[in-house]
Image (cartoon, rainbow, N blue to C red):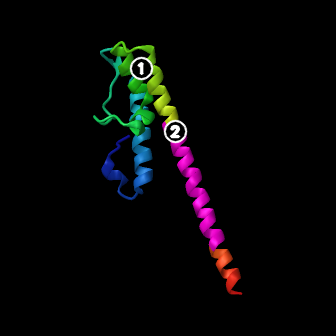
Amino acid sequence: SAFSIRSLNHVSAPQKSSLLKHFSTAAAADSDTLINNRISRAPVPSSLDARTLSENLDIVLSHLRSRRASDEALDAAKTISTLNLDRVSLIKQRDEALQQRNELSAKVGMLMRE
């Protein structure tokens, strides 16, 4: 199947990001090609931050193992990924609570006017 970014012009940015992530992860999983005993990092940006680490943990761990990183370094990468996922979950909970507060605040305002 022919896939290009141009064919996604009608898709919203978050959906496009999700699709691109899916296809790049699927391509990495399908290829099973190891370069220097590690998974290719083609879909991973050159800068490594908590989000990139979380989204590409298997690639990061593969690269760390190929560089003979210590168990502590591998555990640290896993911990960073876990903490970042928890952070994202907490941010979503906060946003939902703020949305609920705003909705209830509007209802209270309407009732006060009555």
* Residue drawn at x 48%, y 26% as measured from the top left: 78
Residue 68 drawn above or below residue 30: above
Q: Amino acid at mark 2?
A: Leu
For residue 67, which quarter of the picture? top left
Q: CA distance from mark 1 to mark 2?
A: 18 Å
Q: Amino acid at mark 1?
A: Ala
Q: Is residue 108 left or right of residue 24?
A: right
> Image point 66% across, 69% down: which residue?
104
Q: Is residue 73 magenta?
A: no
Q: Which numbered disc covers residue 85?
A: 2
Which comes sooner in the sequence, label 1 or label 2?
1
Q: Dot 1 lies on which element?
A: helix
- Position of 18 compared to 109: left or right? left
Q: Are marks 1 and 2 in contact (CB under 8 Å)?
A: no
Which region shows up in magenta? 84-105
Q: Determine crowd level at label 2: few under 14, some 14-19, many 20+ residues with C-alpha closer than 10 A.
A: some
Instruction: Say which residue appears at 44% left-offset and 46% top-offset.
Output: 18
* Location of residue 41 by image quarter: top left
Residue 12 position, x and y percent, is 42, 57
The quadrant in which the C terminus is found is bottom right
Q: Which residue is mark 1?
A: 73
Q: Is residue 39 above or below residue 42?
A: above
